[in-house]
């Protein structure tokens, strides 16, 4: 059954309005990037096309696209609302990038924006799992040949993949503890400080959390709702040039399933062509309006 494009668009528009307002309250500015980029192995996802014997990507991953276009990295706070393609499959995202701060401060700020964005949509039933790639890299020191399989196990939440590897039982027990760790205190100072600074009961340390994109370098997180089976967003820290950065993206369609707000707002209803002068005055004052034709008007 074909989806109702216009009804879906109305929901995404309403959600985006609240997100834009929240992002800008935190000091982020919207960025508009081209839909098509010349192909580069540094760009992720996107739809690969050929034109005049050259390859291009249509709507690639936004974080990699921002890094690709930033020839001289500088500190900035930006946000975007865009569709991202993975081959021909598209996903509408709203995300932030904090570039040029210290990792812990950026992580706490980005996670604070996530929390207040969801609260602005009156979505209270959620939780955030914060993980660390550095913890896993330390645990896998000397076992790099198994890293791909172990990260696959994390992504699939399937410890059986690790269990089948030819490594010692002692190491398997260590990895099992990491795989299943979830709490408020981990003994990893950086992660503990981030969660403590947030002071929100919905934020946990979960070392089983993993993100599939390769540019993340340590702290990562995912946002969940018990009402949905997949993450509604996620992000993490990365490097861009010589600067540290931290970003995240919401899945807008996932948010649309959780958002229960009313779309119809209280509007001042005016009638007739002559009412447009009054409508302009009200709009200047920030009052929502709707101008209707007179009942006796003819088309």
Image (tube, rainbow, N blue to C red):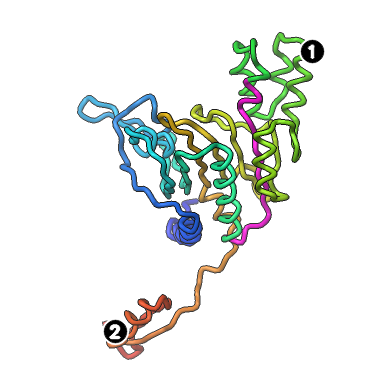
Identify the element where label 2 is drawn. helix
Q: Residues within 10 Å of mark 1 (few under 14, many from 20)?
A: few
- On the question of residue 11 being in view, the answer is no
Q: CA distance from mark 1 to mark 2?
A: 78 Å
- Image quarter where the C terminus lies is bottom left
Instruction: Name the residue at 53% across, 38% down.
Output: 102
Q: Identify the residue at the far left of this view.
A: 52
Q: Which residues are magenta?
A: 121-137
Q: Quadrant of residue 62?
A: top left
Whether residue 234 is in magenta: the answer is no
Instruction: Name the residue at 32% across, 91% down.
Output: 296
Residue 78: percent from left, percent from top:
42, 47
Residue 40: percent from left, percent from top:
34, 26
Residue at label 2?
277
Left-right relation of 298 to 202: left
Residue 52: percent from left, percent from top:
20, 28
Q: Identify the residue at the far bottom of this view.
A: 296
Instruction: Name the residue at 38% across, 38% down.
Output: 74
Residue 104: percent from left, percent from top:
58, 39
Whether residue 136 is in magenta: the answer is yes
Q: Quadrant of residue 193?
A: top right
Q: Identify the residue at the far front of this view.
A: 102
Q: Are marks 1 and 2 in contact (CB under 8 Å)?
A: no
Identify the element where label 1 is drawn. helix
Residue at label 1?
169
Residue 184 against residue 81 in the figure, above or below: above
């Amino acid at each position: 059954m074909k989806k109702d494009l216009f009804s879906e668009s109305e929901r995404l528009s309403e959600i985006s309005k609240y997100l834009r307002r929240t992002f800008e309250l935190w000091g982020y500015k919207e960025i508009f990037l081209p839909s098509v980029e010349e192909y580069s192995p540094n760009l992720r996802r996107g739809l690969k096309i050929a034109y005049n014997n050259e390859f291009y990507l249509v709507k690639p991953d936004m974080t990699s696209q921002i890094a690709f276009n930033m020839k001289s990295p500088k500190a900035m706070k930006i946000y975007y609302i865009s569709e991202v393609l993975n081959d021909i499959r598209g996903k509408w995202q709203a995300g932030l990038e904090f570039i040029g701060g210290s990792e812990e401060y950026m992580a706490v700020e980005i996670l604070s924006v996530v929390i207040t964005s969801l609260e602005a949509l009156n979505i209270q039933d959620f939780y955030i799992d914060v993980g660390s790639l550095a913890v896993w890299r330390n645990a896998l020191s000397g076992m790099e040949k198994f890293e791909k399989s172990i990260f696959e196990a994390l992504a699939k939440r399937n410890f059986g993949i690790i269990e089948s590897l030819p490594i010692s039982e002692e190491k398997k027990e260590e990895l099992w503890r990491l795989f299943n760790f979830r709490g408020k205190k981990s003994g990893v100072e950086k992660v503990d400080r981030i969660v403590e600074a947030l002071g929100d009961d919905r934020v946990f340390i979960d070392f089983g959390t993993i993100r599939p994109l390769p540019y993340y370098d340590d702290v990562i997180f995912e946002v969940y709702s018990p009402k949905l089976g997949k993450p509604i967003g996620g992000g993490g820290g990365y490097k861009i040039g010589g600067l540290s950065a931290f970003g995240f993206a919401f899945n807008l369609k996932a948010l649309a399933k959780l958002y229960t707000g009313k779309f119809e707002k209280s509007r001042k209803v005016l009638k007739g062509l002559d009412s447009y002068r009054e409508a302009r005055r009200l709009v200047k004052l920030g009052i929502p309006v709707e101008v209707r034709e007179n009942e006796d008007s003819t088309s």
